[in-house]
Image: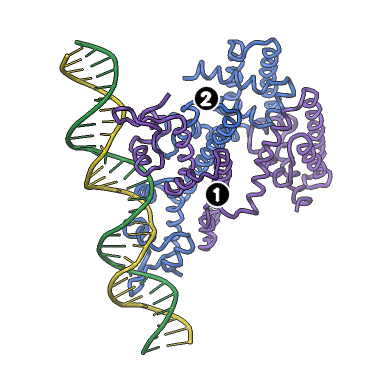
Chain colours: A purple, B blue, C yellow, D green
Amino acid sequence: MSYTVGQVAAFASVTVRTLHHYDEIGLLTPGERSHAGYRRYTEADLDRLQQILFYRELGFSLEEITAILDDPAVDPVTHLRRQHELLRGRIDRLRDMLAAVETAMEAKKMGISLTPGERFEVFGDFRPEEHEPEAERRWGDSDAYRESRRRTAAYGKADWLELKREGGAVVEGFAACLAEGVPATDARATALAERHREHISRWFYACGYDIHRGLADMYVADPRFAATYEAVAEGLAAYIRDAVHANADERGA
Amino acid sequence: MSYTVGQVAAFASVTVRTLHHYDEIGLLTPGERSHAGYRRYTEADLDRLQQILFYRELGFSLEEITAILDDPAVDPVTHLRRQHELLRGRIDRLRDMLAAVETAMEAKKMGISLTPGERFEVFGDFRPEEHEPEAERRWGDSDAYRESRRRTAAYGKADWLELKREGGAVVEGFAACLAEGVPATDARATALAERHREHISRWFYACGYDIHRGLADMYVADPRFAATYEAVAEGLAAYIRDAVHANADERGA
DNA sequence: CTTGGGGTCTTCCGTTACGTGAGGGTCAAG
DNA sequence: CTTGACCCTCACGTAACGGAAGACCCCAAG
C-alpha cells in the first residue's frame, strides 16, 4: 500500500507544496513514483515524515533535520527518546514563560516596573541544552508516572484495598487536626504530611518534597481531587496542601 | 533612563538586526532617537518588546502581532491574560505530542505499525486560528476548570456528600456491569457513562463528550485516579474509560 | 469513448523574518 | 587625536514555504 501526495498531506496536515519542497531538498523523497511520475509514499516515508514534523515543531531547521535523520549511527527508537526529552524541555520552557507572564501580571497589578533583566529572563536560552537544576525535578516527576504505572500494574485487589485503607487513615488524621483547630504548620499536621508522602512513595513512586508540593497543590486546584477531601470536611483539601507545604519547607532541603 | 539597540538586544536575546527590522515595519519604533540618530528604547518600548516576543513565541506573524498590540480596545492586562491562556494551550499540545511519541515508542517496541491516522493525529491543528472542532474542547476544558472552581466554592459539606454518593452509585453500577461480564459497549454500560457525564455537568462544569473522553482517559493514565477505581474492582478504570468512549462515539456528534 | 472535474506534475516568482556584509558616522577611553 | 566598539543606512541573500500558471493524468458518468 502506498499513498499519494494529497493523502499524505491530509494525514499530516501539511500542504502538498510542503511535501514537494521536502522532496526537492532531499529531505523526504517518496519511495517510488508511478509510471506517470506521481509520487508514491510508503509506510517508511510516513515514518520519516512523522520524525520530520516532530523535529520541525521543536524548532530545528530542515537542514538540521536532514542531518539528524540521515545519521546512520542513530536508530529510530533513539530518535523517539530524544524527541521525548526535547519535548519535555519545551514544555518546561513554556511553563517558565507562563510563570513570567504571571510575574508580569503581578508587577502590573502592584504598579511595579521590572528591570530589563527580570523582564526578559525567560527569553534567555531555549535551545535544548544545559538544564540541570529545575529539569531534574521535572524528570523525576515524569519518571514517577512511569514508575507508578509499572508498579501498580502488579497490584491485586487486596493491594488496592490496603493502600486505600492506609491512605484513608492519613486523611482522617488530617480531618481530626482540622477539626481540633490544629494549625497546618503544627508538628502534628506536618507529621501526617510526612506519612502521606511515605505512603505515596511506598505504593506509587519515589515522592520527593517538590513532587509532594505539586501533588498537594493539585488536590486543591483540581475539583475532582478536591471533591474527595471536601466530602470529608470542608476546607480539608486546602488544609492538607498547607500541611504538605509546611512539611516540605521544614524537612525538604 | 533609556537603552541602546545593543543593550536591548542583549536583554531580550535577539539580534540588533531584528530590532532594526521591527523598527522598519513599524512594529517597535523606539521612543526617541539621539541627536546622532541612535535608537533609544524606553521602558515602554521594552514592555512592548516583551509582548512581541511572547506572541512571536506562540507562533503569530509579525503582522498579526502588530494588529493585536495596536488594537486600542485591549489593555495590557488583557494581553497578559490572553498570553496566559495561549501558553496553556501550547503546553497541552506539547503534552499531546509527548503522548504521541510514547505511543510511537510502544508501537515500535511491540512491532505494531500504526495507521496514518493514528500516526499524525497530533499534528492536527496548532495555529491559534480557526479552531472550532478540537480547540473548542481545549478551551472548554480550560473554562471547565474555572467554572468548576467557581461553582464548588459555594458547596457545603452536605453538597459534597450528596455528589459523592451520586458518583459512587454510578461507579458501583459500572462495577456490577464489569462483574456480570457486560461489554463496555453495551447499552447498559453506556447508559451509566451518560449518567456519569451528567453527574459531572451537574456538579462541576458543562461536560461535553470530548471532555468526557479526555477525563476517562485520565482515569486510566493517572494512577492516583486509577487507584480509586481499581480498589473497587480490578480493571474497572479501563472499563469505565471504554464505556465512556463508546457512549461518546454513539451519542456525541 | 469522450468529456468533465479533480488530482498531480514542474516551473517560477512572491513572501516573511530576518542574516550578512558594505560603507560610513559616533563615542568614550587612552 | 586615534582607536576600537558601537551605531547608522542601504542592499542583497536565505529558508521554508505560498500561490498560480500551464500541462498532464485519472476515472466515473453520460
Q: Nearer the viewer, residue A185 or B99?
A: B99
Near mark 2 (Cα within 10 A), the count class, few <14, some 14-19 or many ≥20, is: some
Q: Residue at point 51% right, 38% down?
A: B93
Classify residue A130 by image quadrant.
bottom right
Residue A175: numbered disc:
none
Task: Identify the secondary structure beneath mark 1.
Answer: helix
Q: Name the residue under label 2.
A: B208
Residue A194 placed where, x, y %?
A: 80, 43
Return the residue nearer the eye: B108 or B3: B108
Q: Are marks 2 and 1 on the same chain?
A: no
In the displayed structure image, the side of residue A207 where residue B193 appears, left or right: left
Q: Name the residue under label 1.
A: A93
Crowdedness near tag 1: few (<14), some (14–19) or many (≥20) residues, C-alpha within 10 Å: many
Location of residue A9 in the rendering, given as x and y in whole percent from the top left corner: 38, 32
Residue B55 appears anywhere in the view: no
Find residue B216 and report its horizontal and vertical position in percent.
Answer: 60, 25
Between circles 2 and 1, the one closer to the viewer is 1
| Amino acid on which the number 2 mark rests in the picture | Gly
- Give the quadrant of residue A66: top left
Chain under disc 2: B
Please report, as a chain letter, where disc 1 is located: A
In the rendered structure, the answer to whether residue B189 lies left or right of residue B128 reads right
